[in-house]
Image: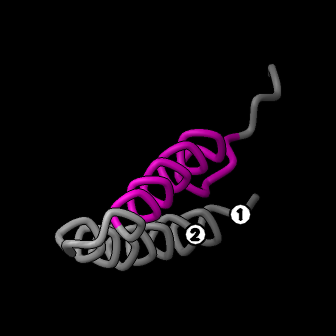
Amino acid sequence: MNINIKIVAFAAWIVMTLIIVSATLRGISKPDTATNLISIAVLLFWTLLSIATNCLTFKNNKKQ
């Protein structure tokens, strides 16, 4: 993968993370229990996805 693509992917991940964290924290602060649980689930899913994809950079694991 080209270095420039990795930089763009990481920048996109940062922007998406800020949007998702903002939306989920807004949902967690609502008085509705269902909204709270959905917001927590979305935040957990985004965290696990970010860990699985190395923050959308897809590190190359080839041994040289």
Vertical relation: 15 (above or below) 63: below
**Location of residue 40 (image quadrant):** bottom left
Taking the image as shown, residue 51 lies to the left or right of residue 14, namely right
Residue 50: x and y in percent read: 54, 49
Vertical relation: 6 (above or below) 44: below
Residue at the image position 65 percent from the left and 47 percent from the top: 53
Residue 12: x and y in percent read: 50, 76
* Secondary structure under the numbered disc 2 in the rendered image: helix
Magenta span of residues: 36-59
- Work out how far the residue at label 2 is from the one at label 1, CA to CA, in angstroms: 11 Å
For the N terminus, give its image quadrant.
bottom right
Type of residue at label 1? Asn
Which residue is the site of mark 2? 9
Q: Residues within 10 Å of mark 2 (few under 14, many from 20)?
A: some
Type of residue at label 2? Ala
- Choose mark 2 or mark 1, whichever is in front: 2
Given residues 46 and 30, the one toward you in this image is: 30
For the C terminus, give its image quadrant.
top right
Q: How many marks?
A: 2
Vertical relation: 23 (above or below) 53: below
**Location of residue 43 (image quadrant):** bottom left
Name the chief secondary structure element in magenta. helix
Q: Residues within 10 Å of mark 1 (few under 14, many from 20)?
A: few
Which residue of the protein is positioned furthest toward the top in this rendering? 63
Asked if labels 1 and 2 touch by Cβ distance under 8 angstroms, the answer is no
Which residue is the site of mark 1? 2
Given residues 14 and 17, the one toward you in this image is: 17
